[in-house]
Amino acid sequence: MRLRAARLDELELPLVEPFETSFGVERSRRFLLLRLESRDGEFGYGECVASTEPLYSSETVESARTMLLGHFLPSLLRAQDPSSTAFVARTQRFRGNRMAKAAVETALLDLEARRAGQPIQAMLGGGRRRIEVGVSVGIQANVPALVARVGRYLEAGYRRIKLKVRPGWDTAPLRAVRRAYPDLELWVDANQAYPVASVERIRSWATRYGVAQVEQPFAERAIRAHGRLAAHAKFRVCLDESIVDRPSLDDAIEARALTSLNVKVGRVGGPRVGLALARRAVGARIPAWVGGMLESGIGRAHNVHLASLPAFTLPADLSASDRYYREDLVEPPFTLGPGSTIEVPRGAGLGVTVLESAVRRARRDSRTLRP
Ligand code: OSB
Ligand code: MG
């Protein structure tokens, strides 16, 4: 396979409603979209999940653009072997920049799968036809608004709800949601917002309100504090930001700091590493699941294929298109099916059609590199 072009677009898509976390509020998502084209006329898309500001991780749209245009894409276009596995091997020695790397690996994987006439799922080893999903609910203006928001997601068919929490938005929202929906499977995610001194307080409210999983309450380097919370807990302790590679996962497992693993393709630097981490966790009897970063239908399709592999057993943070964007970039849009599931597309590559007209409408900038 030879490459003909790499197009890097910057897009902006307005969210259907603002998404507030302990990091702040997002009203629209600005992100990079990579389109690779082979000489034989096939193409592949990859989405970069780096956001405008370095809040979730140190990467940003600007840092990823610099690395992609200045390093990863020129070397890919020059490479003797432009395959996704060779790309991963060549860029392993470069530190960090995992979201930028993941954008390239996913685009190559889509391209390779299309050329092979197979869904990405099959290229990764094969998996389920449908995946179980939940929904991540941002911090709302007040508690009644949250209860109403959760109610609408339950009516839409979501069976697992993840509430974003932070100090000052935890006990009152949880009490109200639990009172309104006594049997609901409830997870929380704090995105590192709590000081490590709050282990006992978190344990107390998470137990009282029947929270099944507490995600990343402490700073990404605070592995021991997560271990203290996980000890004797009635709920799972999930790590997200803390786990970026194999050594960080091995150390966290040894410290008994996690009882659930959130795998995000961007955070760990690509789907193959993500799959290897999930398998490592499962080997230690820690369940894994696929997290999301408010991706468009393109990044979400990649996530859906990954989440269909047998290593992933807990419901993913991958919701229907209409939970994120009024006009998604793919056709057909993702919809919620029976049992809180999303169907894995069956066609070659991503298995969904990328709407170039929608990409053009959302485009703010575009650069094309050639060999
Ligand atoms: O921590 O899981 C997170 C979105 C942006 C940054 C961090 C996170 C999230 C989500 C979104 O929870 C989940 C989704 O894409 O549905
Ligand atoms: Mg998280």
Image: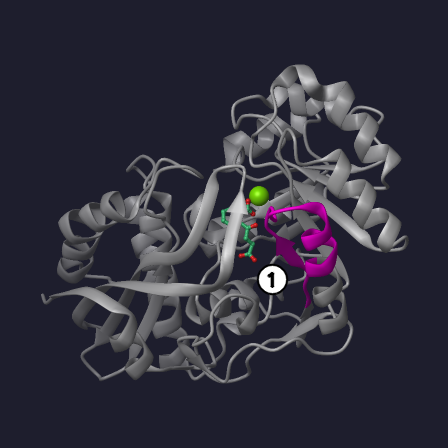
Task: Please tell me in which quadrant of the rendered image residue 240 appears.
Answer: top right
Is 253 magenta? The answer is: no
Instruction: Tell me the amino acid under the disc marked 1.
Output: Ala
Using the image as rendered, state which of residue 169 and residue 55 is in the foreground: 169
| Residue found at the very far left of the displayed protein | 371
Viewer-side residue, 76 vs 203: 203
Please state if 246 lies on the left or on the right of 307 as rendered: left
Residue beneath the point at 53% across and 30% down: 248
- Mark 1 Cα within 10 Å, few/some/many (few <14, many 20+)? many
Q: Can residue 228 be seen in this snapshot?
A: no
| Disc 1 secondary structure class | helix
| Image quadrant in which you'd find residue 145 | bottom right
Q: Quadrant of ligand 2?
A: top right
Q: Which residue lies at the image location 71% right of the left edge and 67% below the top edge?
A: 152
Image location (x, y in percent) of residue 214: 71, 38
Left or right of residue 328, residue 185 in this image: right
As rendered, which of 321 and 174 lies closer to the eye? 174
Identify which residue is drawn at 29% across, 70% down. 362
In the picture, the quarter occupied by the N terminus is: bottom left
How many numbered badges does the structure rendering display?
Answer: 1
Quadrant of image for the C terminus:
bottom left
- Give percent across and percent down for residue 339: 78, 72
Q: Is residue 91 left or right of residue 306?
A: left
Q: Which residue is mark 1?
A: 307
Q: Is residue 88 above or below residue 81?
A: above
User: Looking at the image, which is closer to me, 138 or 348?
Assistant: 138
Q: Which residues are magenta?
A: 132-149
The image's colouring method is: one colour
Left/right of residue 285 with respect to residue 304 in the rendered view: right
Say above or below: 219 vs 91: above
Q: Is residue 145 magenta?
A: yes
Residue shown at the point (34%, 70%) measured from the top left: 45
